[in-house]
Image: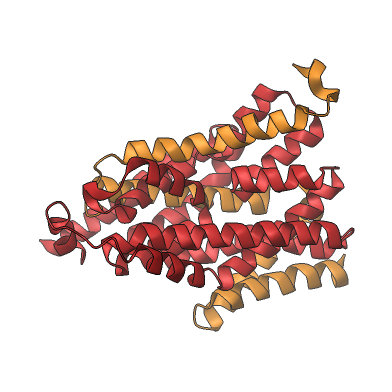
């Protein structure tokens, strides 16, 4: 398999098989598994809780164990940015934009002035 | 639940389909909102990562178009740059994309108009399932008539997808180098935006508890059981939150 790694078409095979099929199959499985599931059932409430917890797991993984350039910021700065975001969000009456802007200000400002 | 009347009627009443084009346009208009802008910026962060590891514009656009889930795209970018084989890369991506299944299962009962909705319509619309469209749909669709939901979601999802693809291409060509602090800021957008929008989308105390438990359990399981961590986080955190919510509401009823 790795013998093909130098061929020009290899990245496209990777994107279609390891990218497209590996993500899209979960969506199709989800449609099929939903079956006759009803919006007001307990099973639906459980599935929603599982989906929510899963996304929350991704959130903390992206913050605590990031790939690439965010990983160059020290962990205390990343955590400070998130805490700053939560404070900004709460101070300005649960505004999405306030939370995001204050997290960004803490991260970028902290990087520029403290590192 | 306020939807019970609609639910009870869903299997017998005929519903209006002629409004489909109208609702598709409404969804497309709804796509011009803050979450789309944030998603655009998050994809800009990804293009700078992609340029760093040497992906071409075609590869970047193919990944965005075919996968449409930023965390999984980042995983595949890492695999491509590390020269990982096809099977390990597919497994890594599939594990990062597991969340799409419960998200889709939770969305379909809201999206569907009883038996009138065709399965292949749902299969196509499911491509737009990603955190942005999901949070938007879970918040806004329950207020719409059932027949309006699928066209509205398709209009919203398709427009967000198209706008983000265009901006990704433009930024890939226009922005050769982003300074590291700014690039880190763009990468941070995804988790921070997910966190606040999930919090806003949570309808019950159970949802909020699931969010909190997932945030805490995610890193614990990542260190203890790497690979299976996301699934475990979802099942353990979600089930505890669901059971706690069930007990709390049942006690209130009695």
**Which quarter of the rendered picture does the C terminus of chain B lie within?**
bottom left
At 28% from the left edge and 39% from the top edge, which residue is drawn? A35
Q: Quadrant of residue B225?
A: top right
Horizontal and vertical percent for residue A4? 80, 19
* Image side of residue B52 versus residue A99, left or right: right
**Residue located at (74% from left, 46% from top):** B60
Quadrant in which residue A28 is drawn: top left
Residue B80 sits in quarter: top right
Up-down relation of residue A22 to residue B112 (above or below)? above
Residue B214 vs residue A84: left or right?
left
Q: Provide residue B12's location: percent of width, then percent of height.
A: 11, 53
**Which quarter of the image is occupied by the N terminus of chain B?**
bottom left
Is residue B187 visible to the viewer in this orientation of the structure? no
Chain letter, red in picture: B
Q: What residue is rendered at 63% in x and 36% in y? A: A19
Which residue is at the front of the view, A106 or A76? A106
The location of residue B190, given as percent across then percent down, is 63, 58
In the orientation shown, which residue stands out farthest toward the bottom? A92
- Would residue A114 be found to the left or right of residue B10 on screen? right
Where A4 falls versus B233 (above or below)? above
């Amino acid at each position: 398999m790795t013998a093909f790694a130098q061929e020009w078409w290899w990245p496209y095979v990777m994107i279609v098989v390891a990218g497209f099929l590996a993500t899209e199959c979960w969506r199709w499985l989800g449609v099929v598994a939903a079956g006759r599931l009803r919006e007001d059932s307990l099973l639906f409430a459980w599935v929603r809780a599982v989906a929510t917890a899963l996304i929350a797991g991704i959130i903390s993984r992206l913050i605590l164990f990031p790939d690439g350039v965010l990983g160059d910021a020290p962990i205390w700065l990343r955590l400070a940015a998130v805490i700053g975001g939560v404070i900004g969000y709460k101070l300005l009456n649960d505004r999405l934009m306030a939370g995001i802007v204050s997290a960004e200000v803490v991260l970028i400002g902290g990087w520029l002035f403290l590192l | 639940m306020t939807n019970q009347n609609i639910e009870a009627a869903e299997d017998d009443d005929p519903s209006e389909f002629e409004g489909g084009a109208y609702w598709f346009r409404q969804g497309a208009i709804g796509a011009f909102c803050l979450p789309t802008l944030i998603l655009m910026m998050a994809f800009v962060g990804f293009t700078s990562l992609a340029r760093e590891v040497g992906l071409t514009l075609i590869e970047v656009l193919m990944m965005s178009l075919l996968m449409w889930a930023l965390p999984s795209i980042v995983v595949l970018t890492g695999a491509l740059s590390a020269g990982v084989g096809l099977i390990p890369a597919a497994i890594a991506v599939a594990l990062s994309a597991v969340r799409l299944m419960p998200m889709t299962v939770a969305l379909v009962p809201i999206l569907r108009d009883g038996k009138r909705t065709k399965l292949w319509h749902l299969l196509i619309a499911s491509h737009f399932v990603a955190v942005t469209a999901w949070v938007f749909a879970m918040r806004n669709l329950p207020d719409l008539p059932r027949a309006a939901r699928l066209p509205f979601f398709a209009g919203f999802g398709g427009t967000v997808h198209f706008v983000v693809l265009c901006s990704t291409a433009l930024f890939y060509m226009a922005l050769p180098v982003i300074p590291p602090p700014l690039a880190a800021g763009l990468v941070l957008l995804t988790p921070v935006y997910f966190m606040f929008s999930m919090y806003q989308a949570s309808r019950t105390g159970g949802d909020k508890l699931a969010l909190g438990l997932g945030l805490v359990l995610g890193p614990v399981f990542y260190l203890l059981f790497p690979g299976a961590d996301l699934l475990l986080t979802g099942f353990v955190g979600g089930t505890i939150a669901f059971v706690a919510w069930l007990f709390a509401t049942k006690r209130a009823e009695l």
